[in-house]
Image: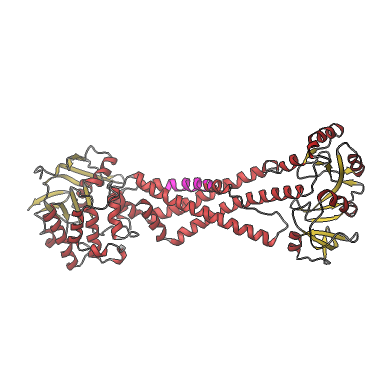
Amino acid sequence: MTAKLVLENLKHKPMRSLLSILLIGVPVTLILCLVGLSHGFLEDSQRRTRGIGADVIVRPPGSTLLTLSGGISDKIVDWLGKQPHVKMAVGAVNQPVQGITLGATGIDLKQFDRMSGGFTYLHGGPFQGPGDVIIDQFYADQQRAHVGDRIVILNTPWRVSGIIEGGKLAHIVFPLGVLQEKTSHIGQVSQIYLKLDDVANTAAVVEGLKEKLPDYPIYSMAEFTSLYNVNNIPALREFIIVIMAIGVIIGFAVVLLSMYMAVLQRTREIGILKSLGASQVFILRIILTEAVILGMGGTVLGIAMSFGACWLIRTVEPASIPMVIVPFWWPIAGVVTLIGTALGALYPGLSAARHDTIEALAYE
Amino acid sequence: MNSGPIIEIRDLRKIYQVGKVDVPALRGVDLTVKPGEFVAIVGPSGSGKSTLFHIIGGLTPPTSGEVRVAGQDLAAMTEAGRTRLRKRSVAFVFQKFNLLPNLTARDNIAIARYIGGSDSKPEASFEEALRLLGIANRLDHKPSELSGGEQQRVAIARAIVNHPAILLADEPTGNLDSESSKAVLEVLRGLNERLGQTILMITHNPEAAAYGHYIVHMRDGRIIERA
């Protein structure tokens, strides 16, 4: 019966109810988008790194997961290629194109093909000359580029020689020497990928190389890809916590305002219920139930809107940070919202429960 | 039937504080009502009729005096105790009907029953009361779809659904035309005569007052006559 009364109250003022749900849903969407973008970025990076087909990665001294400070002499590439159990070593140059969300990689295509099994070309093929670029399908869609088109990257026009399937190495691929020259890193690479004779030797090779190159971060590929998590992105976890706190505050404020107005509008009805013998707990329960329903509606709408945001990002900027839907976060966002809404309903609820019955019945 | 009084009031006083001023609303009221009686209370505005109802109904505590309602001492009662009294022993019918506007007539009755502690269907005797009230075919309508007379009859049905010992009707015909007023008064009389419902009714209307077994006249916070 309580649920029926609450639902009828919500139906009685549909615009208020819908607006409240919408406003509660916005921070839910915000939380889910932020989490979806973080996970999307990390999963995409993991997938593209795994697609390289290497067993070990050697990074420049002082580099972090997201930054590559300085470079490695390409003589080390040759030296690494001669180490025990190392079948081949491939150096690559990385260059940000749009912050950390979009990067270009320079690679020796023949060596890379041997290591990874090669790109899958959807259109066109490998480089035909030094002015060529290979782009993946996401970037091609974003740029509306076709094979043979000229596109400007790093302030220089390039001819698209091939469009590859996404998910391997990078969205934009240049010949190694071209990108080294373009970025003034002649004779240097950003990181080195090693393919071993047997993946079972990975741990031993990594240990051996760490002894010989103590300043270089050297990881097995499994270890390196496992570093792609929220905790290793500087300030991301804190940022998510701040957004969640904002979600709680918005949910709190929206419900406080909405329920305060509702209690004011329903003063007489509260008086009627109390005249029928409704206790303060009963009145508080009605207000809290209504707030929880609004919170649940906001959560569901927020989840639905996160699907919309995901579609929008994939449609407008397919090669930027790919957003993914993370259902694991739905209950977390829901609990955050419900905490906010319950807190927001507490004051109006207590205020309603304490209404003087005679005054409430006289309220016009 | 228990022949002892269902309402027993001795030297009841109620003083409201308006700012720093004490405003006496009741100045020593004595009243005894036996079960099954239909009492009409009349008097000019400000005579203390509604305050007397509010105290008997447990909406506000007395300032002093003795008030026993359905065997319970209201003077010593807490807020929670008065809530229980409204839930089980007394029920109100108001001039403005005071139905919950978002619920149908049926749900208005059901929520009173739910608050009263029962979620089941009302007993057969209540069905008889509904027939007496003549609203059986109007139960699925919301208050805005009902006439004033129908709304008041729903309010009466809601008031009696939990079988209260006392029904307090505060000017139940005050917002009704003469035809609807007569119908509502006949319903109240029927409840009193057929079901033995104890009723106290405030009214300004002498014709309505005549429905009571006797009339209590109030003025300036006192009962001045019982006729």
A236 and A206: which is toward the camera: A206
Q: Main secondary structure of the magenta part?
A: helix
> Could you say where residue A116 lies in the image, as x and y percent from the top left?
81, 50
B18, above or below B109, in the image: above
Rendering quarter of residue A222: top right
Q: How many marks?
A: 0
Residue B22 visible in the picture? no
Give the residue displayed 75% in from the left and 66% down from the top.
A144
> Could you say where residue A137 lies in the image, as x and y percent from the top left?
75, 60
Range shown magenta:
A335-347
In the rendered image, the residue lying farthest to the top is A211
Using residue A193 as the reference point, say whether residue B187 is left or right of it: left
> Could you say where residue B170 lies in the image, as x and y percent from the top left?
21, 55
Residue B44 part of the magenta segment: no
Give the residue displayed 23% in from the left and 62% down from the top.
B136
> Could you say where residue B64 lies in the image, as x and y percent from the top left?
20, 39
A1 and B8: which is toward the camera: A1
Residue A345 part of the magenta segment: yes
Using residue A230 as the reference point, say whether residue B171 is left or right of it: left
Colour setting: secondary structure
B136 and B25: which is toward the camera: B136
Give the residue displayed 18% in from the left and 64% down from the top.
B181
Rendering quarter of residue A269: bottom left
A215, above or below A283, in the image: above
Residue B11 visible in the picture? yes
Quadrant housing the N terminus of chain B: top left
Using residue A262 as the reference point, say whether residue B128 is left or right of it: left
Using residue A178 as the reference point, say whether residue A224 is left or right of it: left
Rendering quarter of residue B146: bottom left
